[in-house]
Amino acid sequence: MSRFREELRVIPTAAWVVAVLLYLALAAVLTAIVKFGGDPGLTSAPLPLKVLFAGGIPIILFVLVALIGYVNGDAQRRGMRRLMWTLLAIFVPDGIGIILYFILRDPMPVPCPACGAKVLSKFIFCPHCGTAVQPTCPYCGKAVEHAWTNCPHCGTKLPRQTLSAA
């Protein structure tokens, strides 16, 4: 399965249903406006333009609702405040709330190597079993990266086993 399809599965079913219903409703309204509207410029327009108007404009609403659903589902799987982010995505105009979500979202949780529980990536130790999820400095106890040779917090030279641990 492709990554795109996996990401589409994050969108809740309710969001898909709302998106499709809004698309169909808006397409029906715009089709009625094109067919029975009193605007002579719109009723005399070429057929491809009418189809683009009645079918293309609702696609924007469909994509917007699907993106809001994605924000909701993705915030939940990342352990973030999904209601807050969903409301920001809905009420901040021009899609800026959605853009802010993609800029500010937390990294994906990682599984604990001992118990398998989902652990937020900012944690050094698993809150369920206490196992170290990231290597730590033996002197100050703060998290370090695998490739580092010195601790950036205290300057201590890191032992070789810390570099290969995890």
Image (tube, rainbow, N blue to C red):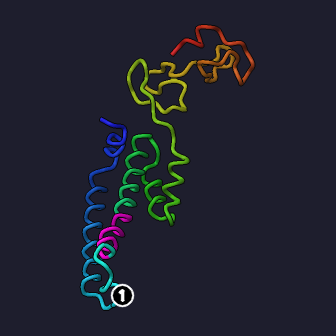
Q: Residue at x 51, y 64 (%)?
A: 92
54 or 3, nearer to the observer: 54
Give the overall secondary structure of the magenta segment. helix
Seen in the image, is 149 located left or right of residue 44? right
Q: How many marks?
A: 1
Vertical relation: 107 (above or below) 161: below
Is 52 part of what is drawn in magenta? Answer: yes
Residue at the extreme front: 46
Q: Give the residue type at disc 1.
A: Gly
Asked whether, in this view, residue 86 is left or right of residue 122, the answer is: left
Which residue is painted at 41% across and 17% down in the image? Answer: 114
The residue that appears at 70% across and 17% down in the rendered structure is 150
Give how far across and how far down residue 166 sits, in percent: 51, 16
Give the vertical position of 98 relative to 25 (above or below): above
Q: Nearer the viewer, residue 139 or 78?
A: 78
> What residue do we see at 41% from left, 45% from top?
74
Instruction: Examine the rendered structure and indicate whether residue 53 appears above or below residue 158.
Output: below
Q: Quadrant of the rendered structure where residue 42 is?
A: bottom left
| Horizontal side, residue 164 vs residue 57: left or right | right
As drawn, is 149 to the left or to the right of 26? right
Q: Which residue is mark 1?
A: 41
Residue 102 percent location from the top left of the image? 50, 48
2 in magenta? no
- Which SS class for mark 1? helix
Check the picture and name the quadrant holding the N terminus.
Answer: top left
Q: Position of residue 79 (x, y in %)?
A: 44, 41
Q: Residues within 10 Å of mark 1 (few under 14, many from 20)?
A: few
Region in magenta: 50-61
Name the one closer to the observer, 48 or 109.
48
Residue 113, picture quadrant? top left
Residue 152 location in percent, x, y?
71, 23
Instruction: Name the residue furthest top.
Output: 160
